[in-house]
Image: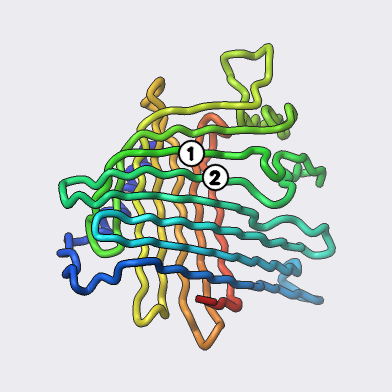
Amino acid sequence: MRRLVCCALLSCALFAGPVHAQEPADSVVYGWDQSLEGGLGFTQTEFENYAKGGESSLTWTSFLAYKAIELRPTREWKSEAEGQFGQTRLGDGDIRKAVDRIRLASLHTWKLGKLLDPYAGVEARTQFAKGYVYTASGDEILVSKFANPLELTQRLGGGRVLAQGLVTRLGVAFNEYIVTDDYYALIDTAGVLLRYTDDIETLDELEKFRLDTGIESLTDYERSFENDRYKVKSMLKLFSKFEDPSRVKVEWTSKFTANLISFVNVMLETEVLYDEEIVKRTQLKEIFSIGLSKTFF
């Protein structure tokens, strides 16, 4: 766990590089700026009478992302809405979910021109469809669905711009985990126990709500190069509860997009999660796709 946190912090330091001076005030355009981007990607592998073996597969993924920023001399208000969904089919098997994510976030920053700029924000996360864990025998175990779990976060603290596109924040966060059905509070999936909201200290009852309060570190890096031909976006979040600061929850998401021709893009997305209270294993998701992407405005 410590190695994972150290690697994450080291990578952020490499992203930062030297601290750059801020842009002159006359080069900043104040007001509202909005963007909407959507995309559809496909991956196919086909085998027939292939001596070395292999199994055919077909995967499709889609995304829609909206961002609105209000920039003023003394404040910045940034809101985001993101949705991802995709499915995969391996051989003649059933169609399974490949990616499923809903994220809504809003962050307000007051620019004081001091060492730290105060901020306050909210965030909500869930998914579109049902999620399953598949056993070795082929059985499927339902482990999640829309609003089960629902994760809500309220945060406040101070942030600082370290370099162009790189912002780090440190503050207090209130994380709520909510389920609407007792089944999703505690799920035993063939020896792997998932505790979304259930309290391990009260084994005689199942809680459908959990509140975690603690220190949160947020580091965002977002840049585009060569007239938006290449785009990089990464977010590292570390959270430690006040009652047990030795346990650190890690969430690290990254996305790299390269435009090949016109609307054709190559996308690489990674997500690393570590949360002992849900499952005591490092969770990793990686998506590589070639597909169509369009920025509407």
Q: Position of residue 247 (x, y in %)?
A: 41, 29
Q: Which callout, 2 or 1, points at the residue further toward the start of the chain?
A: 2
Residue farthest along the bottom direction in this orientation:
261
Please rate how many residues cluster around mark 2, counting C-alpha atoms within 10 Å: few if below 14, some from 14 to 19, many from 20: some
Q: Secondary structure at mark 1?
A: strand
Q: Residue at x 35, y 66 (%)?
A: 31
For label 2, the SS is strand
Q: Residue 119: image x %, image y %?
A: 32, 45
At x 75% / y 45%, what residue is drawn? 134
Q: Mark 1, residues whose alpha carbon is within 10 Å: few (<14), some, or many (≥20)? A: some
Q: Which residue sits at x=66%, y=73%?
A: 42
Q: Which mark is residue 124?
A: 2
Pick the residue in front: 35 or 200. 35
The answer for how far apart the CA atoms under marks 2 and 1 are is 6 Å
Q: Residue at x 72, y 62 (%)?
A: 88
The kind of residue on which mark 2 rests is Ala
- Residue 97, horizontal then vertical, whole percent: 71, 55
Quarter of the image with the N terminus is: top left
Residue topped by disc 1: 153
Q: Where is 60 relative to 93, above or below?
A: below
Q: Position of residue 168 (x, y in %)?
A: 29, 49
Q: In this picture, is 292 found above or below 83?
A: below
Q: How is the image coloured?
A: rainbow
**Kind of residue at disc 1:** Thr
Kindly indicate the quadrant of the structure image that contains residue 24.
Answer: bottom left
